[in-house]
Image: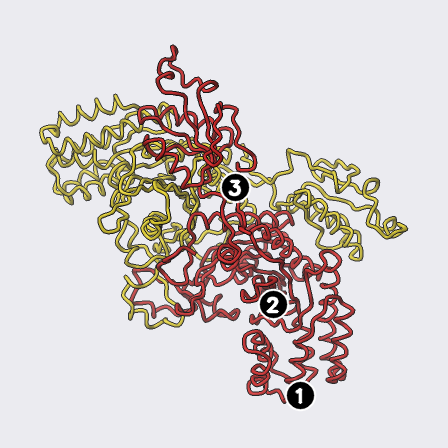
Chain colours: A red, B yellow
Amino acid sequence: MAKGSSISGFPEWLPSERVVEQRVIDTLRHIFELNGFIGIETRAVEQGSSLLKKGETSKEIYLLSRLQDVGNEQDTPVEDRLGLHFDLTVPLSRYVVEHSGQLAFPFKRWQIQKVWRGERPQEGRFREFVQADIDVVGNGDLPEHYEVDLPLVMVSALEELRSFGLPKATVHANNRKLSEGFYRGLGLTDIEGVLREIDKLDKIGADEVKKLLISECGANDDQADACLELADLTAANGTDLTERFNALCELHHVDENPEAYALAKQGLDTLANIIDQAARIRPGSVVADLKIARGLDYYTGSVYETFLDGAQSLGSICSGGRYDNLASQGSKKYPGVGLSIGLSRLVSYMLHTAHAEATRVSPAVVMVAVWNENDRAISDDIARRLRERGIPTDVAPTAAKLGKQIKYADKLGIPYVWFPADAMEVQAAPDGTPADQATHNEVKNIVTGDQQPADPDTWEPDVAIAAQSVTVQA
Amino acid sequence: MAKGSSISGFPEWLPSERVVEQRVIDTLRHIFELNGFIGIETRAVEQGSSLLKKGETSKEIYLLSRLQDVGNEQDTPVEDRLGLHFDLTVPLSRYVVEHSGQLAFPFKRWQIQKVWRGERPQEGRFREFVQADIDVVGNGDLPEHYEVDLPLVMVSALEELRSFGLPKATVHANNRKLSEGFYRGLGLTDIEGVLREIDKLDKIGADEVKKLLISECGANDDQADACLELADLTAANGTDLTERFNALCELHHVDENPEAYALAKQGLDTLANIIDQAARIRPGSVVADLKIARGLDYYTGSVYETFLDGAQSLGSICSGGRYDNLASQGSKKYPGVGLSIGLSRLVSYMLHTAHAEATRVSPAVVMVAVWNENDRAISDDIARRLRERGIPTDVAPTAAKLGKQIKYADKLGIPYVWFPADAMEVQAAPDGTPADQATHNEVKNIVTGDQQPADPDTWEPDVAIAAQSVTVQA
């Protein structure tokens, strides 16, 4: 993040850092579109009523007021005010319902946009950041295979980001039905409460979570232990998962409650299918991890969190799940499944931990020097001809001493400086046409010092340095 | 704009419309980077104090409050609250001052972002829209040639947008110093007032403006007439401009006030240079039009507005100018010049007036059919191989009847449907490997009906329909 950012929680990148973010966004978009996802952008604001009813972040909303209404804000109930969206899932649900007649279902969409959370400033968390989401929303129903497909698309996208310094990513999957069935089979009833406490495992540890399960969720000692044993269960294939889960159910007599076990079994089968399919397509990319709870209350099936090897402190960098009841219109439901990358934190990691760097600040690969201001038209003409062939080109800001011009190019990381044909000779040309470039123009690679004659209509930069790109310092 | 958008003033595009907006954004970014502009993104919020002090739109600010602070908003003065930016120029000025030590000057930047204006909802104007800006900001000084360069970059960008149905664009330029010098030479002192009234010419006509100049700005009948005569002056080259302007100065004795005339002359010379340079590089792209006033008070030199042939009702679609005093730090100034495209209105015009259309909704060029859910892995494998070669591919949502699968592809505009090798034969393969695609896979162009054998490792879509693009209905 740029040093001295003047409002806490609102990160802003320096130009060279923005190159990294922009390339990350371009890469994600490319992968999402390669997989047939359709890009949309929703407005930044939603009705307060819509923002208030959903998700854990409902307390962290920024509401808007027009300057003219300052002092009279209380006249409007919060539900009727406008607020900034805190994620891209609530807006998607609203968008799908609003435009359902004009969409083809299942609707596969990608969306990369800023979101805002009115967190307490002192917490040092981002209050404005970019999310990159993919979701598939069905009309009435949604085939289960999307619960396999979507985490795999995200894994392939995160795989592409390894060239920006990102470690290997692993999706940890669980299923709400599995958890709920198991908890009910134990005799617990405050399912949301248990999920909320289990979600704290990584932060506060098993002992504290056990205390909370007992004090907050009405669990006895045995029930709390069983919840923790379930949370401890991981598996890389469906057979292992099923065996271990069934053993646990037997041990705690969960299978003696047929209704609860049937619910758990439904979640188990979906989860087993997901990790088996994923193992076939991309081994090691998705594991079952039954402590994954997800704070949001709208998930109804699969839930996912994604961790980077060796970057546990980042927490989950890509999360999501299946939500069957988020969007509805009358009796019609629009079940969905999706995952969301917290992009700003990821870019921050790339920049500050992985030391990803733009190869140059400027998109220009060449800067045309200017011998004197009266001859600027000559340099402009060369630049125009280079640009017409798709070569990003800058022109020196002033006809300063050549050293100063080269310094400007160097500061922007522009690798080539173009020296126009000598102005005297151009002016001496009998028909007044611009420079005889073939013999007199020269271009210098200011990194290697190599200088060669060049023609603005044919010269090409070295392929290896032509594109502005991102490298990672070893 | 999508029908039934539920919050007035917050436009939202349907997926096919978003394709057009996205392509417009991509095109502008390409042209800006081709010209060496550096992309940045600033945070969406600024301090109230910063938003309040600048520009005409200072009364149309959205202020933020955290949900927790609702009811106590008055405890914080507006200056100390956060608000959404209403343009990209004020944020740029703040960004440049804040990060000046880490930028290379002159700093050429492009920025395409949403802005928000807390307008009255009933006015039917956009309250959230996208702006596309380029600016060059100097450290201490800024060479005049940028006042020529920037409108020409915008003209070349707008020229690229003609393939999206945009008519030819012409930049109308004026200069604040010219206007101020002329008005002062007439004996007028309320320069901002006169500019404000002149800015209304297109809306209310000369008679009304004359009345206002007299009633609001202390002009007498002759002075008001002279202001209107100046506003009537246009020219396509520097010689014409200079002759006509000097004739007007003589007629109204402006040249008898040496100080005022010197100021006007300074503006005149810059403007003459701009239109002559522009005429040389891109004839007809920039004209002098002395009624261009621009509402914003921070302009100090060149001002620009841009009109589309035959779309006068749109008003100016790209405006800007030179501002010498917007950004400063102590005694250090950061003069800038820039132009801003009101992108959302432009996209609205393309969609609804020029009838620009996406060639398809989905980025996928091919959809792989699924014979039955048990064989989905075969279709997924074909899709993976196509994607590995950069071909955007979707897979049928369900193993429905083939007609239904084709209908889904058709609804998304996906031109090809891939028929995997017959599942029976695959299952009969002795070593259990996937389909013998070379002989059995087929791909059908569902527009032409043409169906051919195809290999997922070599097949290429027809070049003419491979890319999702935008066409304009004649």
Question: Would residue B258 be found to the left or right of residue A16 on screen?
Answer: left
Residue B434 percent coordinates (x, y): 82, 50
Q: Residue at x 41, y 26 (%)?
A: A419
In contact (CB < 8 Å): disc 2 and disc 1:
no
Residue type beneath disc 2:
Asn
Residue where numbered disc 1 is placed? A222
Nearest to the observer: residue B348 or residue A118: A118
Residue B306 percent coordinates (x, y): 36, 35
Q: Of helix, strand and loop, which one carries label 2? A: loop
Q: Residue at x 46, y 67 (%)?
A: A49
Q: CA distance from mark 3 to mark 2?
A: 34 Å
Question: Would residue B361 be found to the left or right of residue A392 on screen?
Answer: right
Q: Quadrant of the C terminus of chain B?
A: top right
Q: CA distance from mark 2 to mark 1?
A: 33 Å
Residue type beneath disc 1:
Asp
Nearest to the observer: residue B374 or residue A242: A242
Q: Quadrant of residue B472?
A: top right
Residue type beneath disc 3:
Arg
Q: Of helix, strand and loop, which one carries label 3? A: helix
Question: Would residue A394 be found to the left or right of residue B147 on screen?
Answer: right
Identify the mark at residue A190; answer none if there is no mark. Answer: none
Nearest to the eye among marks 2 and 1: give it.
1
Nearest to the observer: residue A402 or residue B5: A402
Q: Quadrant of residue A321?
A: bottom right
Residue where numbered disc 3 is placed? B23
- Give the vertical position of B367 relative to A125 (above or below): above
Residue where numbered disc 2 is placed? A325
Q: Residue furthest top?
A: A430
